[in-house]
Amino acid sequence: MIAAEADRPQLMRELLGESLRELRNADRRTLREVSSSARVSLGYLSEIERGQKEPSSELLNAICGALGVPLSLVLRRVSDKYDDRDVVAHLPVRRRVAA
């Protein structure tokens, strides 16, 4: 990993993708198998696992179903990673200027 990337806070979607990949690998499943079961394209599932895309709640539920794990387990893993890392990126919020 590049030094600048190591210092960069992780986004929640990256923690989610990391958790999904860990669960898939632990079950010795391929991206192709899970994408087929979840009815999502292989490329899109890959982007989710790499933290480049954030799935809708419905798609996340379908992926969890394909992995055979409850959604609550995945969210708990993400929450634990968030607490452990304590360096998750907070996106800037634009404040509305009163007219």
Image (cartoon, rainbow, N blue to C red):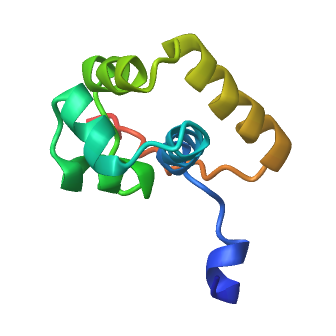
Look at the picture and state if 38 lies above or below 18.
Answer: above
Left or right position of 23 against 33: right
Q: Position of residue 33 (x, y in %)?
A: 29, 40
Q: Is residue 54 left or right of residue 88?
A: left
Which quarter of the rendering shows the C terminus? top left
**Residue 85, image x, y percentages:** 80, 49
Occupied quadrant, residue 77: top right
Query: Which residue is pictured at 32% across the width and 55% down the height?
Result: 46
Give the image quarter of residue 95: top left
Residue 19 image offset from top left, x and y in percent: 58, 40
Q: Residue 70: where, in percent of width, then height?
A: 52, 12
Instruction: Work out whether 96 lies above or below 89.
Output: above
| In this rendering, position of residue 43 left or right of residue 28 | left
- Please tell me which residue lies in front, 28 or 58: 28
Residue that sits furthest to the right in the current view: 84
Q: Looking at this view, is 66 or 85 the one in front?
A: 66
Residue at (80% x, 46% y) in the render: 86
The quadrant where residue 3 appears: bottom right
Point out the residue furthest to the front here.
28
Q: Quadrant of the N terminus?
A: bottom right
